[in-house]
Amino acid sequence: MPMTIAEKILAAHCDRERVAPGELIEARLDFVFANDITGPMAFRVFKEAGGERVFDPQRVAMIPDHFVPNKDIASAVQAKELREFALAQQLPYYFEVGRMGIEHVLLPEQGLVLPGEVIIGADSHTCTYGALGAFATGVGSTDLGAALVTGKTWFRVPESIRFVYRGEPGEWVGGKDLILYTIGRIGVDGARYKAMEFTGPLIERLPMNERFTMSNMAIEAGAKVGIIAPDAVTEAYVSGRAKRAYTFYRSDGDAAYAAVHEWDLSGLEPQVACPHLPENVKGVSELRQVRIDQSVIGSCTNGRLEDLRVAASLLKGRKVAPHVRCIVIPGTPEVCRQALDEGLYQIFMDAEAVVSTPTCGPCLGGYMGILAAGERAVSTTNRNFVGRMGHVESEVYLASPAVAAASAVAGRIAHPNDI
């Protein structure tokens, strides 16, 4: 029986020749992790289940990335619980402030999540690692706590939807625009509990950072995973950093899909998701009259070095509009270091933007960029629900680093070519 890449990975992890959509399985896990928000809840489940030692310290990570450096007493308590659990369990992959990065940028960079693996994290954007050809998905703290004990978890094998991208998009269009276009077409529940499989000539040309961006936002369409078959681009990324052996899987040519979407995106302009859903997508040229108060460049969606390079290329020699706050958040210390070495920090500072330590910060309305009532932000983050970045009467527009940088200069939503 032919299988999709998602089905092949799950079959291999429950020692079966094949699995089919709808089946309930228990799969071995290659890597599990939590952060400062979700970890403490998982630890309580771990203890209630009689857990004494995690199933394998080499396959567990704890990453305080949401509210650190601690923004208040409550966040300090959460971070302390994460730290104490990691120390008690002697976890080698505990990332304290200074080594810490945004988890979904940090773990691939560190070679801890790899092609062909089954990975769960107590964070919804764990689907990011599907860009490597892994079955990676977010779970709740209860499931994470149990997995820390057993090294296994259950899944209902998802159906797969195949997306085929062709054509020659317009200038400045990348992975963020492709995934926003996709969510705009199918809706925030258009792939509910499905495996979104991204294919086609446009995907093959995407560098890894753009692939991570696409898989990262699969959850915004309701998907279980967003997966890209590994290839030479994947191999070049993982070969020098992998901490374990890995396996490349590909879908069979005659595999069955719940649906297939084929799009010619020739001429596509940069896309923007308007308030208050990621499916409310328009071309940037339709939004040039929207005045903004803040621009955020970073997050697990677009906080990689390549994203910062794009932003810097547009901010160089220019100034952020006087009424706009531009906040740049590198994804990891390594991204910080490389951006500093390349002179990107100087460009940002000369443009009168501010550069933050790695943190999820404003993405979830945590800190480092909260919006007041009536304020609008353009952000390279992944969600724009009511109150997501602050006051319930604020607005968030999701866009690429290019659009976010151009908008910071223009003081309004802008196409990069506008500046």
Image (spheres, rainbow, N blue to C red):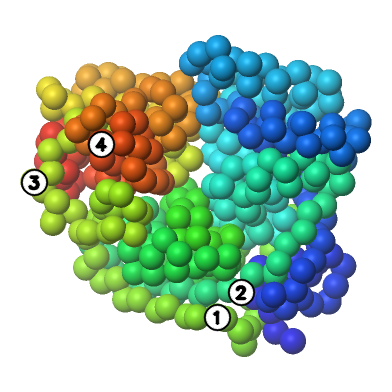
Q: Amino acid at mark 2?
A: Glu
Q: Which mark is residue 393?
A: 4
Residue at numbered disc 2: 159
Measure how far apart labels 4 and 3 are at the Cα level.
Answer: 19 Å
Measure how far apart labels 2 and 3 are at the Cα level.
Answer: 41 Å
Above or below residue 195? Residue 125 is above
Q: Are marks 2 and 3 in contact (CB under 8 Å)?
A: no
- Badge 3 crowding class, 10 Å Cα cut-off, few under 14, some 14 to 19, many 20 or more, is few
Specify which label sits upstream in the sequence, 3 or 1: 1
Above or below residue 125? Residue 76 is above
Q: Secondary structure at mark 3?
A: loop
Measure how far apart labels 4 and 1 are at the Cα level.
Answer: 38 Å
One can see residue 163 in this view? yes
Asked if residue 297 lies left or right of residue 208, the reply is left
Q: Secondary structure at mark 2?
A: loop
Residue at horizontal 67%, vertical 36%? 34
Q: Secondary structure at mark 1?
A: loop
Specify which label sits upstream in the sequence, 4 or 3: 3
Residue at numbered disc 1: 258
Measure how far apart labels 2 and 1 are at the Cα level.
Answer: 6 Å
Q: Amino acid at mark 3?
A: Gln
Residue at horizontal 39%, vertical 69%? 186
Residue at numbered disc 3: 289
Q: Amino acid at mark 1?
A: Ala
Between 237 and 373, the one lying in front of the other is 373
Residue 178: percent from the left, percent from the top? Answer: 36, 61
Q: Are marks 2 and 1 in contact (CB under 8 Å)?
A: yes
Residue 24: percent from the left, percent from the top? Answer: 77, 69
